[in-house]
Image (cartoon, helix red, strand yellow):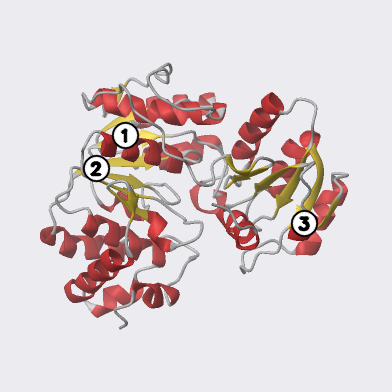
Amino acid sequence: MTTNLDDFLDKKSLYYDKIDYTIISKSWNIIKYKINLPYVVHIVGTNGKGTTGRFLASFLDQLNKKVLHYTSPHILEFNERIWINGKNSTTLELNNAHIQLLEILPIQYIEQLTYFEYTTLLALYLSSSMDYIVLEAGLGGEFDATNVVQSNLSLFTTIGLDHQDFLGNSIEEIASTKLRSCTNNFILGHQKYKEVYETNDKTLSNYKEISFLENLQKPIKYEILPLYLIDNLNLALSTLEYLNLSIDNLVIDKLSGRFEYIAQNIICDVGHNPLAAQVIYDELISRYPTQKVILVYNSYENKDYKAVLSILKPIVKYVEIIECTDTRIVNKKILKDTMLSLDMKHKDFDIKNISQNDIYLVFGSFLVVEEFLKFYNYD
C-alpha cells in the first residue's frame, strides 16, 4: 500500500452506483479513539456549501480559532479540499496523516473505502484538537460519509434538484434526505422552494432551529460580492452569532471559482445545476443589462444541462464547448443536439480566440473551470 497520498487516491473509486455506509462507519469507530474531535459544523445543501463553509472557516480563523475546512471537489489540486488555519493543507501534512491511517485501519477497510470516504476520514483525523471543523457534505444525505460523526450544529444551504439518482426526484424527497442528516441544533438558510420549509417542519421537529439572520452583511468589508452569495454569507454570520463570536471587522477572502473574475472580462463559476444557473443569470443581468456573454461550457451527463442552457440562453451570445476528459461527461453530439433544439449557436472552445471585447462565463462544473485554467494563465 503506497504511502504517497496522490498515488493512493489515484487507485480509489471516485464514483459508485449506490451508497454503502457500512465500511466508513466501521472505520470511524476505530479512528475516533485516536483523535480529539473538535466542534463540528456540518454543511448540507444543494448549492452554496463551499462558499458558506469558506466564509465561516475564514471568519473563525480571523477570530484566532483553530479551524479545518473540508470541502469538495477541488479545482487544481487536492490540497484545496482540506484548508487548515487560513491556507490549503500541505502535501507533507496530508501524507503524514495518510501514513497514520494506513497504520490504524485494517487493510480490508482501506481497500473498500471510496475516494470521498477516505478523504473524509483524512480530514477528520487532521482536525484533532482543533477548535472547529467545518465539514461539507458531498451528495449530502443522511448516509453521506460526512455524517459518520455527530455534528454540534448543522447548516442547510439552498436545497434544489440535483443528484436525483441518489436523493430523490422531487424537492420534498431531496429535502427530506438532506435534512435527515441533522443530529443536533441547526440553521436553515434562505430557500427558493416552499417545500423545503414544509419538509423542515415535518422532519426536524425534534431539533432546535436557530434563527437565520438575513441582514448581517453590513459589518463585512468587501468590494463587489455577487448577490447570490449574500445568503451564504449571512448563514456563516448567523453561525458566528449563535456561537457568541464577534462579527465586527471581518474580511472576505477571495473565493476561487465562485463568480471569480480571473480577468476583467472572464468570470469562472463552478456551478453546475439549474439552481446555480438561475442565480448566475440574475447576477449577470444586474451587471451587464445590455450585453450578452460567451458561455464556455460542458456538463456531466447526469446533470440537467438542457435546463441549465435554457435558463442562461437569454444572456448567451453563443456557447463554446470545452473538452473535458472524464467518462461522466455528456456525449458531445448529444450536447450539440440539445443546443440545436434550443436554437443556441455553438462551436468548439479555442483559447486563442478569446477576445477582449467580449465577456466570458466559464461554467458547468469544477472540472470545466479546471480545464479552462489549464489553458489560461493567471495570478
Q: Residues within 10 Å of mark 2 (few under 14, many from 20)?
A: many
Give how far apart the Cα atoms at labels 1 and 3 are: 41 Å
Does residue 117 appear left or right of residue 333 in this picture?
left
Of the residues under marks 1 and 2, which one precedes in the sequence?
2
- The structure residue drawn at horizontal position 49% and vertical position 48%, both measured from the top left corner, is 167
**Residue 178 in the figure: left or right of residue 76:** left
Residue linked to disc 1:
59
User: Quick one: label 1 or label 3, which is nearer the N terminus?
Assistant: 1
**Amino acid bearing label 2:** Val
Image quarter (top left, top right, bottom left or bottom right) of the N terminus: bottom left
Residue 367 visible? The answer is: yes
Task: Give SS at disc 3.
Answer: helix
- What residue sits right under mark 2 in the picture? 40
Measured as percent of width and height from the top left, residue 295 is found at 74, 46
Question: Can you identify the residue that label 3 sits on?
Answer: 335
Regarding residue 350, the answer to whether it shows in the image is no
Sequence-first tag of 3 and 2? 2
Indicate the amino acid at tag 1: Phe
